[in-house]
């Protein structure tokens, strides 16, 4: 087995509300930022990964705009799971000798430009649209359905959900770039308006402009660079859906992607010191903690009590940048920020007060689509190079 | 009132949503079974915000309905008091769905669902 590829550069756009810029310019800005972080240039890039948030069709426009000379390109759209999956796919392409330096970009301007690809003319309507009450379905509702069932089967409470937001807001209060930098209490969450029962407004993530980029490189390139690199030790990816009428709302695709990633890394959840867990909603975190194996099925609500998610001393600090719930959820898909904060933790570059001491093993988990219907899950296990 | 539930003639599986083949055994010999539309709430949410122009008037209930001996169906659930719906509540069809031309709608199946 060849040594795994390394994440050698990351960059998160510092702004959460951005005007006077186009989406192609945004993708280029974050690309240049991540390459500068790595000590590489666009001329070194021979693989490019983006997803449905990138402008135009597939890789065509951005590859031309950046004038990339590519051996490998992939634009599989897994929503918020895409950047995490792209790290894994790039790692495999590099291990197979198909490329040496992969660039991944993600970003958009949903506060300026409505993100509504499904209404693009010429795009085929998905089969389920005939049979599901499309006009009555909202994104929060599809997560609320999971929360209701989780509460019914396992006794999870709204206060348990609120604990996830409390941890995220506390972390965000250490992040000068966070959209919502003020700490909140569980009561604040419970007193915020119901959006789709049982989810309150503060159970929902933010909407932000912005984005980020990641550079993955072959190990022989990583050793020549000056910045600390991070090994991609394990990767898993999975789809989950309504199962032809037998939908089970109590688990996520993380069951499969997590098992794959831990098996490849030959590690267990208890080895992980920091985790970036996709947090489109508070219930997303609780269910993914279970599905990834950080606690038993149904125990997520109990797991998050007593400050378990708080850095630096909680049982499992998560989303120390403030996550999608309080910091950044660029282009309505926060996967790229999940990878970036995990890399910061492993480099020892997290914000003061939330750095996990001696962090050598971390996990990043992305989710796309909707937990209540059709979703993608992608998980990577990362280790700091000594 | 009834709903035509897609059923595989080869393996007997009842599935949702309708397809021209069985998603379980892959047979192309699929038909429908007339179902009276009785079931229970598998999960639900009271939608209180929906900015879409064609959205129902809020608040309304969106639910996964588990048909008796049948599939789980994502549907609008009519309830006199949306906040009173609970998992396990019995439901019935809100309108005839025997022709199966679009999403079925259900209603809470008790005379006064506001009493809790």
Image (cartoon, coloured by chain):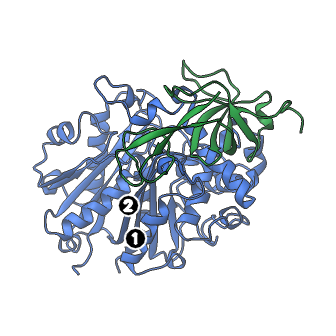
Chain colours: A blue, B green
Percent coordinates x, y for residue A140 in the rendering: 59, 39
**Where residue A98 appears, x then y in whole percent?**
13, 63
Q: Is residue A367 left or right of residue B85?
A: left
Quadrant assignment, res A379 = bottom left
User: Which disc, if any, is residue A260?
Assistant: 1
Q: Which residue is mark 2?
A: A237
Spatial separation of the CA atoms under disc 2 and disc 1: 8 Å
Report crowding for label 2: few under 14, some 14 to 19, many 20 or more residues within 10 A (C-alpha): many
The reply to whether residue A354 is in sight is no
| Left/right of residue A156 with respect to residue A25 in the rendered view | right
Decide: is A321 above or below A63.
below
In the rendered structure, are the residues bearing label 2 and label 1 in contact, judged by CB atoms less than 8 Å apart? yes
In the rendered image, residues at marks 2 and 1 fall on the same chain: yes
Q: Earlier in the sequence, mark 2 or mark 1?
A: 2
The image quadrant of residue A296 is bottom right
**Residue drawn where x is 44% and y is 36% of the image:** A128
Chain letter for mark 2, please.
A
The circle on residue A179 is none
């Amino acid at each position: 087995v060849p040594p795994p590829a390394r994440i050698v550069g990351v960059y998160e756009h510092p702004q959460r509300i951005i005007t006077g810029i186009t989406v192609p310019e945004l993708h280029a800005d974050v690309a240049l930022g991540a390459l500068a972080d790595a000590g590489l240039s666009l001329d070194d890039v021979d693989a490019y990964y983006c997803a449905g948030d990138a402008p135009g069709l597939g890789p065509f426009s951005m590859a031309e705009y950046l004038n990339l000379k590519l051996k490998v390109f992939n634009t599989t759209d897994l929503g918020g799971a895409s950047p995490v999956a792209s790290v894994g796919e790039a790692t495999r392409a590099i291990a197979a000798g198909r490329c040496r330096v992969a660039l991944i970009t993600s970003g958009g301007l949903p506060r300026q430009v409505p993100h509504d690809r499904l209404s693009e003319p010429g795009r085929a309507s998905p089969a389920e649209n005939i049979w599901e009450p499309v006009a009555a379905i909202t994104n929060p509702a599809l997560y609320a359905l999971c929360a209701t069932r989780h509460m019914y089967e396992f006794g999870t409470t709204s206060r348990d959900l609120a604990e996830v937001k409390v941890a995220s807001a506390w972390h965000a209060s250490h992040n000068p770039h966070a959209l919502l930098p003020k700490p909140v209490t569980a009561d604040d969450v419970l007193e915020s308006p119901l959006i789709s029962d049982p989810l309150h407004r503060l159970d929902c993530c933010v909407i932000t402009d912005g984005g980020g980029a990641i550079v993955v490189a072959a190990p022989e390139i990583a050793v020549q660079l000056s910045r600390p690199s991070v090994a991609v030790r394990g990767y898993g990816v999975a789809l989950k859906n309504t199962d032809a009428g037998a939908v089970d709302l109590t688990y996520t695709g993380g069951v499969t992607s997590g098992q794959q990633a831990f098996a490849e890394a030959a590690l267990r959840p208890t080895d992980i010191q920091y985790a970036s867990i996709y947090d489109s909603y508070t219930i997303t975190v609780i269910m993914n903690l279970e599905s990834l194996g950080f606690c038993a099925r149904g125990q997520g609500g109990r797991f998050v009590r007593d400050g378990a998610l708080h850095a630096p001393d909680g049982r499992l600090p998560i989303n120390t940048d403030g996550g999608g719930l309080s910091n950044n959820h660029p282009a309505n898909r926060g996967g790229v920020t999940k990878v970036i904060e995990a890399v910061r933790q492993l480099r020892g570059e997290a914000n003061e007060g939330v750095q996990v001491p001696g962090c050598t093993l971390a996990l990043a988990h992305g989710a796309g689509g909707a937990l209540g219907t059709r979703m993608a899950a992608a998980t990577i296990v990362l280790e700091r190079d000594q | 009132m009834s709903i035509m539930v897609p059923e595989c003639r080869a393996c007997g599986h009842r599935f949702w949503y309708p397809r021209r083949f069985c998603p379980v055994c892959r047979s192309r010999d699929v038909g429908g079974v007339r179902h009276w539309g009785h079931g229970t709430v598998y999960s639900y949410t009271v939608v209180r915000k929906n900015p879409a122009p064609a959205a129902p008037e809020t608040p309304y209930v969106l639910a996964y309905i588990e048909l008796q001996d049948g599939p789980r169906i994502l549907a609008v659930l009519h309830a006199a008091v949306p906040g009173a719906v609970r998992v396990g509540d019995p439901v019935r069809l809100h309108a005839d769905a025997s022709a199966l031309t679009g999403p079925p709608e259900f209603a809470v199946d008790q005379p006064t669902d506001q009493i809790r």
